Amino acid sequence: RVFCLACGDQISRSELQEHFEALNPTWKAEAFGVAPDGDVFLTDEQVRNFQVPACRKCGGILKPDVTFFGDTVSKEKVSFVHQRLAESDSMLVAGSSMQVYSGFRFALAAREKKLPIAVLNIGPTRLDHFASLKLNSRCGELLPLIV
């Protein structure tokens, strides 16, 4: 889902993709470089010519309904995760070093409930010392094999 920061209107990610394509019919998603963290480098022309869709209701800024690094996790999301943990028999952490407490606290809650925790990440994480399983692999390669 994607939502408007001003009015809260929501649309699906696939609907947003249709808006991207309608506004940018000739834009090519070609990176001229990729950083180790997966970020891509675009030319100045690619950035300058890209049109970003606005909210269909108020013209506001759209944002994916995810928690970005540095964002505050809403009380509703915290409650939702704790409810799901209460129904779970294990926890999978994929693609995170868990350095930020907002995510790490969920792993601590899983550990407190004595749930096995599996970690899938390239490199060390804050969970390595108490994870039941640690897989040092790329999420994009391994997740399709286990999901």
Image: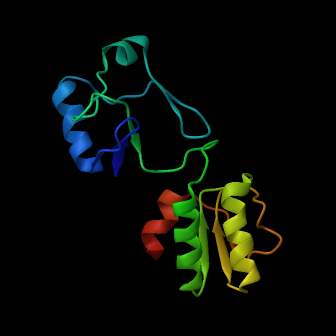
Observer able to see residue 98: no
Residue 30: % across, % down: 36, 28
Specify the farthest residue to the front: 7
Q: Quadrant of residue 38?
A: top right
Observer able to see residue 131: yes
Residue 54: % across, % down: 28, 29
Specify the farthest residue to the right: 129
Residue 87: % across, % down: 53, 86
Residue located 29% across and 44% down the image? 9
The color scheme shown is: rainbow
Q: Quadrant of residue 79?
A: bottom right
Residue 4: % across, % down: 35, 39
Q: Is residue 52 left or right of residue 115?
A: left
Q: Nearer the viewer, residue 36 or 98?
A: 98
**Relative to 139, is 58 above or below?**
above
Residue located 64% across and 41% down the image? 70
Q: Nearer the viewer, residue 10 or 112?
A: 10
Q: Quadrant of residue 93?
A: bottom right
**What is the total number of numbered labels drawn onto the structure image?**
0
Residue located 48% across and 67% down the image? 143
**Relative to 48, is 29 above or below?**
below
Q: Nearer the viewer, residue 146 or 89?
A: 89
The quarter of the image holding the C terminus is bottom left
